[in-house]
Image (cartoon, rainbow, N blue to C red):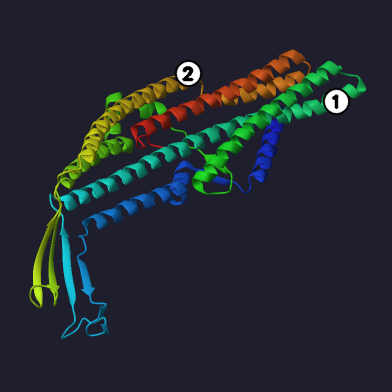
Amino acid sequence: MRRNYLKVAVVLALSLFSQLCQAQDSLRLTLPQAEKIFLQQNLSLLAQRYNIDMAKAQVIQAKLYNNPNIQFEGNIYNPQQRKAFNIGNPYGQYTVEVTQLITLAGKRNKQVKMAQTNVLLEESRFFDLLRTLQFTLRSNFYQLYFLQQSINGYALQVSYLEKLNTAHQELLAKGVVTLKDAVRIKSLLYTLKAEQTSLQNQVNEINAELQLLLQNKAPLIPVVNQLDVASELKRYSLASLLDTATASRYDLKEAQQSLVYSQQNYALQKAMAVPDVTLGAQFDKRGSFVDNATFFTVGIDLPFFNRNQGNIKSAKVNIDQSKVVLQLQNETLRKEVQSAYLKAINTNQMIQSFDPGFVQELQKLLVSVTNGFQRKDLSLLEFTDFYESYKDNLVQFYQLQNEQMQAVETLQFAVGKTIFNY
């Protein structure tokens, strides 16, 4: 029996060595390391940060006052004096006028407040994008890890079957075994290889997404520290998670700030109905009732027709719309947290029913069954049935573990922050 386990150890060592050779250019990362690279290099986040900077620049712009306006009017040609550009003494003529637009009803302050609120909106959009991309990163990270575990389980079976297939082909040539038995072994081998390839294709797709998120060309090999989900879930109640989500979710903050922005815009549009005043001074050298005349000017629009009625009504409707969006966002948040919390509880209960040593027991049984088949203690039907059962149970076990971690990450995504101690 020791020799059998020694064979298994050699097979596993060769399998691991082969995988290490293939993955020599791979990047081994823990989840915190992957998140650190993501925060530094993700292009979507870098692009979104520029929106915040642009919004801050608009605050500076909103604080600026209107520029004064100066106008100069001079004589091009004096036919009596036969002089071009005759603007000097004693017969020249020119006028100079300086005007300044004065905004009323607090328009400038209202525009500054709107620009400041827009900065908060862009920051909320940035952090909500960060929340979404982090969820994608973490979800793919765990899915990749458990898929690779399943592939490793397939590799052990395939290595055994390849040896059995080679042996049966030799025995078939000698007439010791039937063609039916040899084909059955080969068929099982091909089936396992096809399923293993399908899993590898899923790994490649997830790796492509992770490479895009991390801006890294090397395939990722996740290094996972198992989380005690049961203990972590006991630390939180549904009510506390809802409170945390209300305080942390940036999509909710964005909806709240959008309502504030709509209210500020409504106040601005009402102020826009108040006409602005233009103040000025004018100097006229020789074109007025006296030489070197000076004048004071005041100008204002008469609000007979356009009192900004349409924009005021549109802004008022936008407030009502923002209130509905905020109410919908609150309800959506509550449902997402509740659903994610129940899913995490249910998947944890399912995992708790599994024996932690289940995989090790399966692998030991695989060795025993393989040796029993080689000793003719088991029929081909019993042998193939076990191999199918082994593969199904192993894949299902890792799928359940993946579902548990996906439920944990979905809950953290719904809450809006990392709440579990990894």
Tell whether 240 sits left or right of 161.
Answer: left
Q: Residue at x 74, y 13 (%)?
A: 381
Up/down of 55 relative to 286, above or below: above
Q: Residue at x 47, y 18 (%)?
A: 353
Residue for badge 2: 353
Identify which amino acid the numbered label 1 is placed on: Gln
User: Is residue 3 something one can see in this rendering?
Assistant: no
Quadrant for the N terminus in the image: top right
Q: Residue at x 23, y 47 (%)?
A: 114
Tell whether 395 sits left or right of 276.
Answer: right
Residue 213 image position (x, y, % from top left): 49, 44
**Frontmost residue, 225 versus 360:** 225
User: Is residue 35 something one can see in this rendering?
Assistant: yes
**Frontmost residue, 24 versus 357:** 24
Residue for badge 1: 169
Quadrant for the C terminus in the image: top left
Up/down of 33 relative to 144, above or below: below
Give the image quarter of residue 180: top right
**Frontmost residue, 20 versus 313:** 313
